[in-house]
Image (tube, coloured by chain):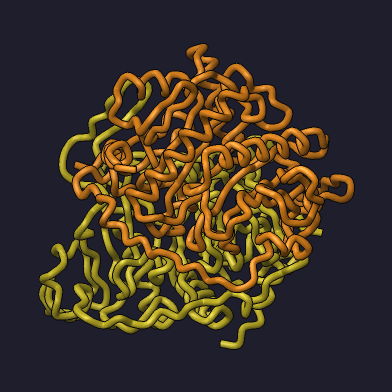
Chain colours: A orange, B yellow
Amino acid sequence: MPELRKDPIIGRWVIISTERGMRPSDFAVVEEKKKGGFCPFCPGNEGTTPPEILSYRENGTKPNTPGWSLRVVANKFPALRVEGALNREGEGVYDKMNGIGAHEVIIESPNHNETLSTISVKNFEDVLWAFRDRMVDLGKDTRLKYGLIFKNQGEAAGASLEHSHSQLIALPIVPKRVAEEIEAAKAYYSYKERCIFCDIIRQETKQGSRMISENQDFVAIAPYAPRSPFETWIVPKRHSCSFEEAQKHEYENLARIFSDTLKRIDKVLSVPPYNFILHTAPFSNGCKDYYHWHFEIVPKLVKIAGFEWGSGFYINPTPPEESARFMREAKL
Amino acid sequence: MPELRKDPIIGRWVIISTERGMRPSDFAVVEEKKKGGFCPFCPGNEGTTPPEILSYRENGTKPNTPGWSLRVVANKFPALRVEGALNREGEGVYDKMNGIGAHEVIIESPNHNETLSTISVKNFEDVLWAFRDRMVDLGKDTRLKYGLIFKNQGEAAGASLEHSHSQLIALPIVPKRVAEEIEAAKAYYSYKERCIFCDIIRQETKQGSRMISENQDFVAIAPYAPRSPFETWIVPKRHSCSFEEAQKHEYENLARIFSDTLKRIDKVLSVPPYNFILHTAPFSNGCKDYYHWHFEIVPKLVKIAGFEWGSGFYINPTPPEESARFMREAKL
């Protein structure tokens, strides 16, 4: 009998087809061939991107020249513009504002053939530091309310350039799904005076069936009501609402568990396309007691029928207990 | 300058890239080739589907034999099961229930090569009557709370069989997105004592820039803050919360405008994959004053990065005023 499960935070119901549970081999991942050709993100081509906002590079090398291990540049085709004042306007029943914001690209490695699953843990940590540095910097701009960090890995997941990169979009509004999650966490806290994510970590650690791995500072779990097969969350054990406020040892341990998780995903699912999103507090903060930052990773294995994001209703053919088992047992 | 626009109902903000406005020819629609091979939905193969629940057929022909113009059968691989009582259960912080519900397939035409864009207006009307008949029937089951009617057209939009069909999933819960929409319409009504959809129709009819077409009973519009290029809504002019309660002349006029809209989509975008969803009241009704049923059609033109449905935040490269103009000017 299939099961209807409710996401304890957002309240979204998901159908889990426990019977016809799809195994990793049932998902036909089409391995993407490297296309080659000119790459604006490769060393030597620095002049073809907007100038760098941040880079980690060898001592003595100049900005916008080779010698970097990580580079942050503005998106050449930004969805939002940095310049100007924020104007809000009504138009009858409708509301709009001009598209103030920032859209940046984090080029994670100089090597065109690396991915986040193959770079060293040290380099992975640098990616996390770059996320943090840019969030802290953009958070100072009072026009901006939220920094959305995400990655589209693989063309099928929306990547338009194959050289490994993540993106940061800083917005003058808080995206709906984030606001909902924060509101829901607040409601749970008002009722129980506990953080719902902390409660989830306690229960998952105890039950074990959806645990993938853990280290001193983090757990990697399959969520109870995943929208997609092999959806994976990485959650810090220490309660904190904001990614930017993590401790040094937390970034180190996050790099370890994140790298390990992506290697497991690649192993179990044959290098699938995926997306991840950082869920963290708005720049204004103000949700310290009840919100809890984390990463959500969603491999792109099933065609998301438009009706699913239109209705907020998902059918998932793989129970998270099974996906967690495959992930735990992966031989790296 | 790009624009941030707020959906007036749900409150979702969308970035509309007004500058680089993508035109229909910018979307590379890969035309799907008919694959041929055995089709369980073709006449003569009635025995390979579960027995029919409803059919419209020539007088004197027997159920589950040829002679039908439309057939409704249970999904052979249902996401939910009809049998049994509904059990709700907690598991620590989590909630679940068993997967009671119905999952039906509406086979829209006996002809394998027809689509909803090519069948006659009369046949289209029959599809709408079948939607209505099944909703009315399933609404009598007190275990069920909501009937979700949708269509995945084309493999890229999630269709697993190419013979034209829609689906109905009847659920023991109200999907999140539907509940949100109803709540938001209620809040607007409490504040203004007017239906927000009625206000939208008034403003769109007056402004005209996002109008695609209208007839006596319906308007087809590009919504103000569309998630996707060429998103199109078909909304009844008469206020009513429930699709099942439409009048006969409304089904006739809905068939006309819906058929015309799909023909325009096919013409402008070269027969793209698409999804549509019926947004209607839960079976219990109870939102008569403030909710307003309608169809939302979303062509699948852009790769939906997982981050978009994860964050509830969309970037749309085509302003709705432009998509509406292309749709209006399409020569059928």
Q: Nearer the viewer, residue B330 or A303?
A: A303
Query: Looking at the rendering, which quadrant does residue A43 occupy?
Result: bottom right
**x 23%, y 47%: residue:** A21
Picture coordinates of residue A219, whole percent (x, y): 43, 28
**x 41%, y 45%: residue:** A263
Q: Nearer the viewer, residue A329 or A298?
A: A329
Q: Is residue A97 visible?
A: no
Q: Is residue B198 left or right of residue A117?
A: right
Query: Looking at the rendering, which quadrant does residue B157 occupy?
Result: bottom left
Q: How many marks?
A: 0
Query: What residue occupies the far top of the structure in this picture?
Result: A193
The N terminus of chain B is located in which quarter?
bottom right
**x 50%, y 50%: residue:** A275
Q: Nearer the viewer, residue A126 or B293?
A: A126
Compared to residue A30, the image places residue A223 above or below, namely above
Query: Looking at the rendering, which quadrant does residue A125 occupy?
Result: top right
Picture coordinates of residue B84, whole percent (x, y): 16, 39
Q: Is residue A102 visible?
A: yes
Picture coordinates of residue B156, whole percent (x, y): 42, 68
Compared to residue B326, the image places residue A84 above or below, namely above
Query: What residue occupies the far front of the structure in this picture?
Result: A60
Query: What residue occupies the far right of the structure in this picture?
Result: A84
Q: Is residue B249 left or right of residue A240?
A: left
Picture coordinates of residue B155, whole percent (x, y): 38, 70
Compared to residue B69, the image places residue B132 above or below, namely above
The C terminus of chain B is located in which quarter?
bottom right
**x 45%, y 46%: residue:** A298
